[in-house]
Image: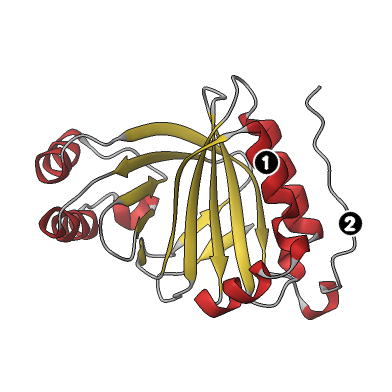
Amino acid sequence: MLTVRGSEQFFAGVVLLDCAPLQAECISLFAASSTENRLKHFEGYRGAAFLASVCGRFALEFVLWENAAALATVQRNPLFSEHIKIVEHHVKTHYVAFSTRHEICGRSGISFTRGERFLCALYTPCTPASLAGAREQIRSMAEVETAGVLFHSTENGASFVLLSKGAFDAPAAAALSATCGEPAFKGAFMVVESIPAPSDAERFPPPYRLALSAA
């Protein structure tokens, strides 16, 4: 289980994929398997969670690296991109953003447990004022303290994603809508798998070649 504390700061990525109908869980499982057997053994990997939409159409990935330099280093290794090329052959990338501008709201951070449900909302484009307003509203919502919310924006603040374990109550949802408008995307997701950083004993050079059957 991947758990991210509010005090931890990483180079985080949010990737939203548009899959063929009912293919999202398959894509998420494949990405999780390749991460377990390969990506997590690269230096700088700090964790990832893979979610599939309840409707079966969208896959969502939340990925953590130590910093931007660590990700840039591993991207030069051909083994890193092999699984990405396979996944991209079967899906369309709806949204992708990597940045240091993320925040965890909640007393105990946020965890990604297999089978757990999340609500996702993507706001794009957004203004500096709406971005700042959304941050303050998220921090002040009482249910955030127990449910946990991930707030992730692009480095330039042009868009942001909210990933919440609980639904906002009506007044909170109305306030967020008044500040940020309606989301460009929203949906319910279930955690398919999460892969935390390995222990020292688990590290090994990633040796596997990958394939994803279309059948």
Q: Residue at x 46, y 75 (%)?
A: 8
Q: Position of residue 97 (x, y in %)?
A: 43, 56
Q: Residues within 10 Å of mark 2 (few under 14, many from 20)?
A: few
Amino acid under disc 1? Val
Q: Position of residue 66 (x, y in %)?
A: 55, 76
Is residue 67 visible to the viewer in this orientation of the structure?
Answer: no
Q: Residue at x 48, y 64 (%)?
A: 12
Q: Position of residue 61 (x, y in %)?
A: 55, 48
Image disc number at residue 208: 2
Q: Which residue is mark 1?
A: 87
Which image quarter is the C terminus in?
top right
Which image quarter is the N terminus in?
bottom right
Amino acid under disc 2? Tyr
Give how far apart the Cα atoms at labels 2 and 1 are.
16 Å
The reply to whether dot 2 and dot 1 touch (C-beta < 8 Å) is no
Q: Position of residue 71 (x, y in %)?
A: 59, 71
- Secondary structure found at label 1: helix
